[in-house]
Amino acid sequence: MLENPRSPRVRAVAKLTKRSARNESGLFLLEGPQAVREALQYRADSIVDLYATPSAWERHTDLRDGAEKHGIYVTLASEAVVDAMADTVTPQGVVAVAKQWPASLDDVFAAKPVLLAVCEQVRDPGNLGTIIRAADAAGADGVILTGKTVDPYNPKVVRSTTGSLFHVPIVVGADVVDVMERCRQAGLAVIAADVKGEDLLEARSAGVLARPTAWLFGNEARGLEDEVLAMTDRALKLPIYGRAESLNLATAASVCLYESAFAQRTAG
């Protein structure tokens, strides 16, 4: 059993909380039984190492069964070791190291998408994770990250996707202008979510959202740059009926993606 929280092996895993280590190794950290469960079900081939405390391994029989099914060896470790590896305060006795698997633009557009989420300069890990989760729930065909958007393999992003990281293709490091051009070539309208846009309700009534659509979401503080906004096909804003100053980016993105999902399925 692995018992020394200061061992080189433990330190190597703990370094994956840093982007530089993730970029250098092509690996990332999974924390907690839910994340590992999703990985075993959808991307078992990505798991490089699996660690668990004896009590957690005894408790989570489904993880044992999944690991055995895919021939994945578990290293039993002390609570102190698992805690030292993890980014969270309470990793619940299970962590894993997995290979990153970013999709390419070619992968996404080869699948003939009808709904995409494009994130331009989204910097908050919780927001990005929630957008990925909402895109998955709304049946989107991919999430494309452009500019200096936060790393999707950041531990906080991974946790906030609650497993959706394993369900939807995610493109990393794309150029927003190139993405918009690819979208138009594929027959998707590029719609910006922006406070300066037209009323979303009116656009919905006009049938705009029933079309194949790529939603473009900007930075939490600055929104989209004017030159980027000018290149979109349309900008829409969510109406505020109460006294809230605005909506959180991830909340607004969730509404936009679901509005398109509803409209496309009604039209179909």
Image (cartoon, grey):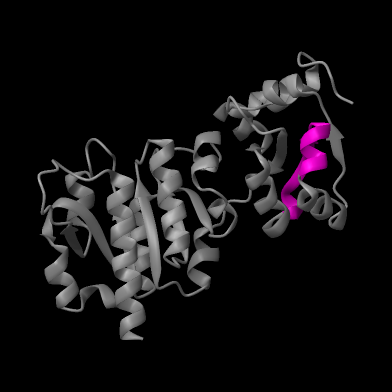
74 or 153, which lies in front? 74
Pinpoint residue 216: horizontal percent, then vertical percent: 30, 55
Q: Is residue 165 visible?
A: yes
Identified at 34% across, 75% down, the residue is: 187
Against 130, residue 187 (above or below) is below
Against 95, residue 233 (above or below) is below
Residue range (magenta)? 44-59
Pinpoint residue 113: horizontal percent, then vertical percent: 44, 72
Pinpoint residue 92: horizontal percent, then vertical percent: 67, 34
Q: Quadrant of the C terminus?
A: bottom left
User: Where is residue 147, by image quadrant?
Assistant: top left
Identified at 25% across, 62% down, the residue is: 191
Q: Residue furthest top?
A: 6
Against 85, residue 188 (above or below) is below
Q: Is residue 174 left or right of residue 23?
A: left
70 or 227, which lies in front? 70
User: Where is residue 214, by image quadrant?
Assistant: bottom left
Q: Quadrant of the N terminus?
A: top right
Q: Is residue 102 left or right of residue 33?
A: left
Q: Is residue 34 left or right of residue 151?
A: right
Q: Is 56 covered by the magenta stretch?
A: yes
Q: Is residue 149 visible?
A: no
Against 14, residue 39 (above or below) is below
157 or 229, which lies in front? 157
Identified at 25% across, 73% down, the residue is: 209
Q: Is 234 covered by the magenta stretch?
A: no
Pinpoint residue 212: horizontal percent, then vertical percent: 34, 74
Q: Is residue 105 left or right of residue 198?
A: right
Q: Residue furthest bottom?
A: 268
